[in-house]
Image (cartoon, helix red, strand yellow):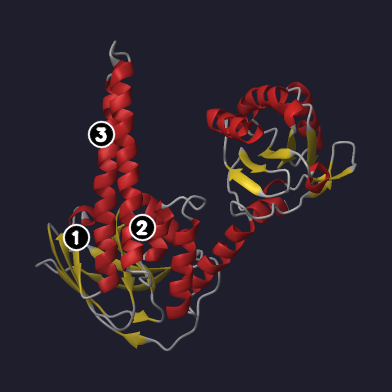
Amino acid sequence: MKKILILIIAVVAISSCNQKSESFEISGSFTNSGNEKIMLEELSINQVLPRDSATIDEKGNFFLTPKITQKGFYRLSINPNNYIILILDSAESVSITGDASNLAETYTVKGSENSMQLWELNNFLKNNYRTRDSIQQVFQQYVNHPLMDSMNTVLEAQYNISIANLGSYIKNFIDKNPDSFVGLAAIEQLNPDADFDYFVKVDKNLSAKYPESPYVKALSNRVADMKRTAIGSDAPNITLKTPKDEIFSLSDLKGKVVLIDFWAAWCKPCRAENPNMLRLYNKYKDKGFDILGVSLDKDKESWVNAIKEDKLPWTQISDLQFWNSPVVKQYGFSGIPFTVLVDKDGKILAKGLRGQDLENKLEQVLN
């Protein structure tokens, strides 16, 4: 559930609309309450905006009448670690019950259809994550057991079933509720590459229903970025300088299967992956395979030294702009190492492959 709550805040990236404010009511009744203060905050754009607060009375009841200017995600909290997320607008008053000592695990909500849907979604996620956590605990407990090899097969199968169940649940929810505001949270559980059509579906339906919503506009911008690097699309050209200050472009390698490797000298996981990259380069370079290293370094000396230390023979380019490099937005990634596999015609074949998955894909494409 934590993943959903964090990504709900991150999804809004543009300014909010100014709409006519209307009053509505949030009422609640909690057990185990000690006259705490309860606060309602709007999770808007890249900031949290206070909207109303009250003190829970001696009977555990509270009453809020905030000014809601737009349909969106709101946080109702007793303290920073004890809160729930609601989807509110001025048309639906809301009533909430729960245990004040642990709202997230005990609350129920009535009055807001979207808040009730979000409650159902989070309950499913909690149970799904608990299943996976229990499988991981068993694995860790018996990691040195003599029968671990056979146990691992069973545990891995159960884990994969849990992941598949999650994907099925999310897709089924979106199919049944294509224009639900909860879709903004639900799609964060899906793989943007494998399930790109669901991102498009949510964007299309919400854009039609809430064309002025900043949340929806942010999703539309994101989907537009994703389309530029979707599997099967033309890989955006990259033109940067080599360590010798020579201009080099991805298009210079057209006719080869190219792995674009986004990395940096300061990135330990990238450096750890380089020996495997070198092995694959040597294995497939005579079959029409090449690598283009694109560095997010900001210090040229460190970048050049890393290339030498790791003995990387393929072309390396960079603008030395760190995370401010335009290639970050161009290819839509937020962490490195990150790879994009491009075919001989410049079409994107795969993204984010490393290790055995990358080798399997190269074997398939080149043989």
Foreground of the two, 40 or 305: 305
Asked if the residues shown at circle 2 and circle 3 are in contact, with their CB atoms under 8 angstroms apart, the answer is no
Question: Mark 1 = which residue?
Answer: 107
Of label 1 and label 2, which has the lower sequence position?
1
Q: Point out which mark residue 134 bears.
A: 3
Spatial CA span between label 2 and label 3: 24 Å
Foreground of the two, 14 or 248: 248
The image quadrant of residue 337 is top right
Count neighbours of disc 2 (C-alpha within 10 A) and say few if under 14, some if 14 to 19, many if 20 or more.
many
Spatial CA span between label 1 and label 2: 25 Å
The image quadrant of residue 69 is bottom left
Of label 2 and label 3, which has the lower sequence position?
3
Camera-near label (1 vs 2) is 2
The residue positioned 64% from the left and 48% from the top of the image is: 348
Of label 1 and label 3, which has the lower sequence position?
1
SS at circle 2 = helix
Q: Point out which mark residue 171 bears.
A: 2
The residue positioned 24% from the left and 46% from the top of the image is: 127
